[in-house]
Image (tube, grey):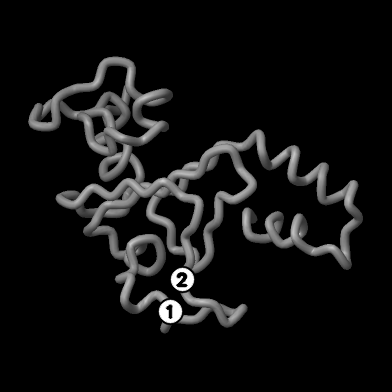
Amino acid sequence: VIADFNDRIEDKEKYTVEEREVIKKNMSKLEVYIFAGAAHYMSGKYVSHLECLSNRGDVVAVLGHIFPNILKSIWRNTRGNGIIYDHCKDHVETSNWGHSFIPHYLAPMEKGCFSGSKLATDYWLKNPQKKNESETSPLIHST
């Protein structure tokens, strides 16, 4: 979706200056958080904040966000481009594995993983726990 709106802002033939400015103004209000991004193209050029959070051992993220840099230009998408992540703040937990959202991303975030992330520090964590605590996240418990 971000790529489509970026295209609209930059397409001077299909869209008027006014239309492009409205899209740009609305996009500038967005904060976008991507977990285990498998997209080939992700640009935060026109949004106020873009973060890409991945676990090093998440095979889905390996298809996009954390695909080896040396190979990014070789694996082409439908536009003929290699994998591009720009204007994006990367947060990769090198010791974490798994792709399930709650146990592999949110629960570790509660325990201090992704500590440099704006999502973790400004929105998610009220009282961050230490990484080595064995307490299970309240999100995982059924009530």
Q: Are marks 1 and 2 in contact (CB under 8 Å)?
A: yes
Estimate the x, y position of residue 138 in percent, counting from the top left: 27, 24
The quarter of the picture where the N terminus appears is bottom right
**Which percent across, then down, holds residue 95?**
15, 50
Crowdedness of circle 1 by 10 Å Cα count: few (<14), some, many (20+)?
Answer: some
Task: Using the image, determine if residue 41 lies above or below residue 24.
Answer: below
Relative to 49, is 111 above or below? Answer: above
Question: What residue is rendered at 64% in x and 47% in y?
Answer: 46
Q: Quadrant of residue 71?
A: bottom left
Q: Amino acid at mark 2?
A: Ile
Could you tell me which quadrant the C terminus lies in?
Answer: top left
Toward the viewer: 105 or 95?
Answer: 95
* Side (left or right) of 14 relative to 78: right
Residue pictured at 43% horizontal, 57% vertical: 37
For residue 58, above or below residue 89: below
Side of 132 where 103 appears, left or right: right
Residue that label 1 marks: 73
Element assignment for label 1: loop
- Report the residue that reaches farthest toward the top: 127
Q: Which is nearer the eye, 112 or 106?
A: 112
Could you tell me which secondary element the residue under label 2 belongs to? loop
Quarter of the view holding residue 8: bottom right
Give the camera-side residue of 121 and 35. Answer: 121
Q: Which mark is residue 83?
A: 2
Q: Residue at x 22, y 30 (%)?
A: 112
Q: Amino acid at mark 1?
A: Ser
Q: Along the horizontal axis of the image, is 138 left or right of 27?
A: left
User: What's the distance in space between the residues labelled 1 and 2, CA to CA?
Assistant: 6 Å
The image shows residue 127 at horizontal and vertical percentages of 27, 16
Establish if 41 lies above or below 71.
above
Neighbourhood count class around disc 2 (C-alpha, 10 Å): few under 14, some 14–19, many 20 upward:
many
For marks 1 and 2, the one nearer the N-term is 1
